[in-house]
Image (spheres, rainbow, N blue to C red):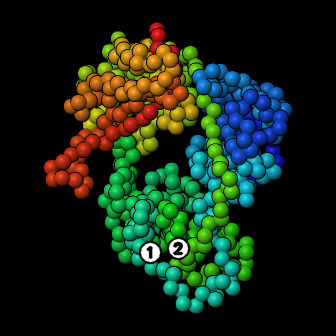
Amino acid sequence: MDATPQHPRDLVLQHLPKGPVTLLVAVDHPRNAGLPVSFSDHVVVLVLADAEDRVDLRDPTVLRVHYLNDGDPVLATVDWDAVFAVAGFTAPNQLQSHLRHDAVPAGLEPDRVLNAQRLLHALGLGAVPPRSADWNFDASPRLLAADADRTTWCPDKREAFERLLARPPGDVLLLIDPQGPNVDIPEPLRQAPHGQLRVARRPPWVDLAISVSGVGWGEHVGPQGVHFDVPWSAVGGMRSLDNQVGWFWPVDLPATIQGQLQQAGDVWSVLQHLSGVPLPATAPGPANGFKVLNLQAPQVADKRTALGRCVKLGMCVAVIDTTREGVVLPPTLPGSARQMMVPLRLPNLDPHFVADDVGFMAVMPDFAGRVVPVRVPWEAVFLVADPPGSRIYAWPQDYPDEIMTALHALRSAQRTDGAEVEVPGVLVKGAAEAGLGTDLELLRGDDGGFVLRLSQPVGGPQAVDGGVEGAVGRAVMGMEFRLPVTVGH
């Protein structure tokens, strides 16, 4: 975490050539104009894929931002002094966060800086030290020395882990040293100064094995699995997901956190001789209701630009009409799947994404979980979106006939006097009845718009853990997007 007085505009221009940049904006700054809320306890998150992505960066005093408000395009001005955090890349897979302490909004009281660090950590923005976000290692020597009976301590890590697994909800967070000997985890995690790993007995965690030497498990991520093997010597702390119970082992903490504790010499002189210390209660979060708003990006007419920006920002999907001329699918993707999601930038899947003026090529999991190539012309793409929903691009003129018919059916059910009428969702079926395709369900949104829900297999049939003997299930990717209100061609 870099607490720096450097101008946020300079930071944005510095990081954008290396990859996407995220800005956190205090809404209540008096020189902001045009933002959708006016409450002092709100923060706007603005994610930029490139220097032309819905912003004007030329003015050193204000940032001009285009966004959609209830479907309408709006131009807002944000004073650069309202930007209290900037996160961007310095190199591939190296994210750096800058927190401007004096600009953190009052809505994050009682501890503005700590809660701003928590917010950055929750958004996955950079190497935020765990003690400033989710962990609390503060303990006074007097308190530790006075705790003579130590009935709440747990020096044995295996016992501590099993006790936490037995607590609802059964999720354990492990704080580990990724560079420790015999640590076997995915390579990107090994590059961090510390790791926070979540593990439980239920899927997507599988094959959990606990021994006297450590703990190992697998995780299903998309069509592929990843493996973790962590010796107890690399575990410096663990706690339950509800943050009510946990312990730490000071001399096994990652070096970055040990360094923080060593700065308080009296505390460290006691802690380094202790083991299985109960984690103190974490500092309180914001005193009042706190909301984080993502500004919806405006519609981009050019599909190549829209998909390219989504791909830069991480996982996204292109929803396609497979009946269009030029769509090339392998035999393992059934031709009867008339609409289909093409997921891009799935975790642990080499993207192989190439776009040109005609369309794009990519790889994706077929409905049995195998990685297969696809070729899609731009005419077949009718929706592009990221899973959080901050970017949803839709081209109604290219909606398949089945979706247009369903949209018209939902609209015709509306009462002319504006009164509510019970309208069920309309299910557009391809080959999903046989577990071979994509289910699409259209629903009326509370705001009068329409919601498209999609679910698509990304793995073959598997036995259901704990289910009826012989029962099988499938790994399914499900997403939901808000469509524009317009339903006409």
Report how far apart the C-alphas of labels 2 and 1 lie in the structure.
8 Å
Q: Is residue 378 above or below residue 154?
A: above
Q: Quadrant of residue 380?
A: top left
Could you say where residue 121 lies in the image, as x and y percent from the top left? Answer: 61, 52
Could one spot residue 54 in this view of the protein? yes
Looking at the image, the residue that sits furthest to the left is 470
Q: Earlier in the sequence, mark 2 or mark 1?
A: 1
- Depth order, front residue of 244/98: 244
Q: Is residue 145 above or below residue 406?
A: below
- Residue under the point 68% across and 53% down: 288
Give yes or no for contact between labels 2 and 1 (Cβ–Cβ under 8 Å).
yes
Up the image or down, 190 lies above or below 411; here it is below
Q: Residues within 10 Å of mark 1 (few under 14, many from 20)?
A: many
Please tell me the numbered disc located at residue 160.
1
Kindly identify the residue that appears in the image at 69 percent across and 43 percent down. Answer: 42
Identify the residue position indicated by label 2 in the image.
Answer: 247
Judge from the rendering whether residue 98 lies leftward or rightward of residue 433; answer left or right.
Answer: right
What residue type is disc 2 on? Trp
